[in-house]
Amino acid sequence: MAIVHNFIPGNIVAPLISFEVNSGGQSESQSRLVLIGHKTTAGSLSVDTLAPVQTMREAVSLCGKGSMLAEMFRVARANAPAQEIWLGAAADTGTAEVRTITVASVPAAGGVGVLTIAGRVLQVAISAGDTVGDVADALSTAINGFQDPLTQAALPYISTVSGAVVTLTARHKGEIFAAVDIHAPTTIASNAFAGAALTYATTTAGAGTPDLSGVLAQYADDPFDWTVSPWSDDTNFARYETLMNDVSGRWAWNRQAYGHVFTTKLATTSAMTTFGLAKDTRHVSTIPQIASAGNATPPWEFVAAEAARQVPWLSDGASGNVSRNQTGLEVREVAAPRDRSLWINDYATRDAFLTSGISTWKVRDDGAVVVDKTVTMQRTDGAGNVDTTFRDIQKIGQVMYALRRFRARLQAEHGQKAIANANPGDLLAVTTVKDIKATLIATAAEMPGVLDNIADFADRLDVRRNADNPNRVDIYAPLDMLNPNDVMAGNATIYSEYRASDVAA
């Protein structure tokens, strides 16, 4: 075999002993999780800008205390401690929601008032003889000063007070803030805020959805594999499809940047299935919340937490985690809806959602939110025929991992070479169709946690030189992916006593 050099020329004469250094090629799975949301004016991150963030301290500095982005980062980091996370700031548009809490009465002997806002628990001490104005002032102070010392969670509102009325103004503009839950728990004994002690009103409804085109334009072809965005309105949904499409987007043949978007939808069960059936794309997954009062965790936190819980597995092809069933993965830092009717636990709803392109989650008996099954929104082959090939979210992670690994090995072993039908001189500078095919088969065999039936893949693999362009090699690579073990159906046949004639069919 002739030895080839990339840097040392073949026509030098002066004596020397020299080694050039080249890479033999080593691929590693790297993925970034991007969280898109709003920042406050206190944050230093520029709008329509992406920035990597590692700690909650950085997130608060860049995005502001209590901002949508800081809270999305908080729950994402709790679910993916080692994940590379980037934040993308989008300008808010429209009107900020304004709510009021009126203190109607206080216990004469004093006590403790407990209020939850966006799932955070506030406690207000009430002294004997305090007036409604005193309590309203204390409540407003508690809201503005709140930051959980353990989780660093803050509130999505700033507060002012006048007499007995506490006015809450959302930190950001937009209709999405209508989903924030405010509640005085009745399950806490002697809660001074329970019952009719507080009255609530929305004096200004939030309005508007942001234009995400600016922040999405920052992706270019960088490896931003997983995106979380809490807006699923038709305009922004179309932007996700533009970003990811297979013709000119990140999945196009000439870009190969790939990626996937997790979004969320707040709707009734009927409207949810209608929404899913109106879409047909493998590039988006929708995490639902049933529309009603009582969703303790705001939608932007809910979707960020659930996506972050899954992304480390979806990015791990080496150990096979990418292919696993995810049912039962506990999602940290989210609260189950207060109203059990909002839990997506019944089989009929789960099955209807999944076949409509809507993902599902469940609530365990202990109240923990867990992953049920996450799907993409692709249901047909584009011609109206049912096609479930890309329904499982695992397939997206598998395809990204496998194609990148194939590309890396092909580049390392066959890049910067000449192509020939045969290589009788066994020259390192020359490759053949047979060599390329061998690399593809060997690479496939190195991915047992992603690809199935490697021997059959080797038989079906077709590599040949293009008939019109002698500089081109065409590859047909039929990849058989592993499938998540979602359903196990058993037949339990019950006997009072076995009969000798009873033999399993």
Image (spheres, rainbow, N blue to C red):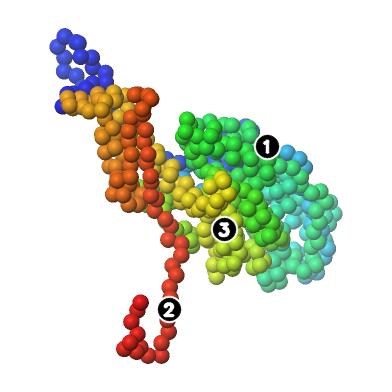
Q: Residues within 10 Å of mark 3 (few under 14, many from 20)?
A: some
Residue nearest the observer in this picture, 414 or 260: 414
Q: Kindly identify the amino acid type of the residue bearing the numbered disc 3.
A: Thr
2 vs 1, front mark: 2
Q: Residues within 10 Å of mark 2 (few under 14, many from 20)?
A: few
Q: Using the image, determine if residue 379 lies above or below residue 476.
A: below
Residue 179 point in image, percent of width and height: 70, 54
Alpha carbon separation for disc pair 3 and 2: 27 Å
> In terms of sequence position, does the residue under pointer 1 or pointer 3 come before the other?
1
Alpha carbon separation for disc pair 1 and 3: 30 Å
Residue 266 point in image, percent of width and height: 67, 54
SS class, disc 1: loop
Residue at left offset 29%, top offset 46%: 459
Residue 19 falls in image quadrant: top left
| Label ID, residue 225 | none
Q: Which residue is disc 3 drawn over?
A: 355
| Label ID, residue 211 | 1
Q: Kindly identify the amino acid type of the residue bearing the numbered disc 1.
A: Asp
Q: Which residue is disc 2 drawn over?
A: 492
User: Residue 249 vs residue 469: left or right?
Assistant: right
User: Residue 356 vs residue 460: left or right?
Assistant: right
Residue at left offset 40%, top offset 50%: 481
**Circles 2 and 1: CB distance less than 8 Å?**
no
> In terms of sequence position, does the residue under pointer 2 or pointer 1 come before the other?
1
Residue at left offset 75%, top offset 56%: 138
Alpha carbon separation for disc pair 2 and 1: 55 Å
Q: Quadrant of the N terminus?
A: top left
Residue nearest the observer in this picture, 97 or 123: 97
> In terms of sequence position, does the residue under pointer 3 or pointer 2 come before the other?
3
Q: Kindly identify the amino acid type of the residue bearing the numbered disc 2.
A: Ala
